[in-house]
Image (cartoon, grey):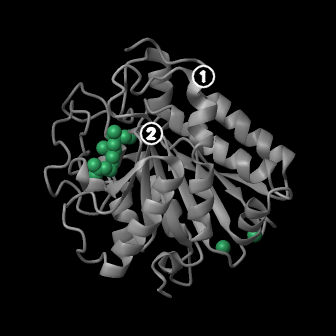
Amino acid sequence: TFGPVDPGYTDYPEMQAEVARLVGLYPTLASQQVIGKSFEGKDIVALKISDNVGVDETEPEMLFTANQHAREHLTVDMALYLANMLLNDYGSDPAITKIVDNREIWIIPMANPDGATYDFATSSYWRKNRQPNSGSTAIGTDLNRNWGYKWGCCAGSSGVKSNDTYRGSAAFSAKETQVIRDFVLSRRVAGVQQITEHLDIHTYSQLVLWPFGYTTSTVVAPLTADAYAAHRAIGTEMADLNGYWPGQASGLYIADGIISDWMWADQKIFSFTFEMYPKRSDLFEQFYPPASVIPAQTSRNRQALIRLAQYADCPYRSISKEN
Ligand code: 0X9
Ligand code: CA
Ligand code: CA
Ligand code: ZN
């Protein structure tokens, strides 16, 4: 298993360069914003894609987050594939054109730039951020255990600072989760959250997951029967299109303090998790498949992402309801 990270993956400076390249090439459709700094002071970048990108229009907004987990390098390339798909095919692909004209899409390609940079440098299968923990030499918080809904509730995270799923000293104790939370909260206009759908991108196992992760219960407040059914319907449609397996997040194992549970419970944003290539049984590739897989394993999600975007005006349409 287990050579170094393939330099064919996109590292932090390359991500910044690619975002800048796209904004330069498509100034009316793409803009970038530094939404805050990582623990080590790196910029956390959000790319906005829409027609009239300089105007905050009244269009359904979507958020994509990638690379909360440092070693999941393929997810950065997935986020940049999405950006390229929307921008390069605008004006030629009718489905893409309609999405860019009628949505405001936010992409955070690298939620954990400190961890990703460390993993590129060390090829150490690093997962967490790089924030020190008081009273310990162990570094890092698992960002996807640090979110503030049911934080640490349910044995789906660790209180041990050296553990790979260490949840942090408190909900939102990590700088990076604070920054992304505050960005999401900033998308409320007159008290109405503008973001309707969110996708959090991980590797691996080839799964499409929906809330909740903290419990195996399906319909549990504030996830209504209709909201659960709509998550399941959209998630299953996406899985039909990308060949992943659909399921509730907790089906794999209980995880508490995850981003998706917060997105729904706190903001009523429909929220999904992708676990990308390889599939669970591919024990030899895991987090570091060769970069030669990037084109096939990003483009396989094209139709699923288009479908998700098409539902952003009314996710309940997936179950033939208004809301
Ligand atoms: O454990 C995670 O944070 C995610 N899997 S990963 O292998 N990329 O670390 C899954 C989060 C949601 N899933 C579960 N509740 N199991
Ligand atoms: Ca627009
Ligand atoms: Ca808007
Ligand atoms: Zn992950």
Q: Element under label 2?
A: loop
Disc with the residue nearer the chain's start (1 vs 2):
2
Q: Of the residues shown, which amino acid type is indicated by label 2?
A: Phe
Crowding around mark 1 (Cα neighbors within 10 Å: few <14, some 14 to 19, many 20+) is: few
- Residue closer to the observer: 230 or 263: 230
For label 2, the residue is 39
Q: Residue at x 36, y 80 (%)?
A: 226
- Image-based side of 95 in relation to 248, left or right: right
Q: Measured along the vertical axis of the image, is residue 65 above or below residue 235?
A: above
Q: Of the residues shown, which amino acid type is indicated by label 1?
A: Ser
**Residue 291, percent from left and from top:** 57, 23
Q: Residue at x 46, y 54 (%)?
A: 239
For label 1, the residue is 292
- Image-based side of 30 in relation to 282, left or right: right
- Residue closer to the observer: 243 or 80: 243
Crowding around mark 2 (Cα neighbors within 10 Å: few <14, some 14 to 19, many 20+) is: some
Residue 173 visible in image: no
Which label belongs to residue 108?
none
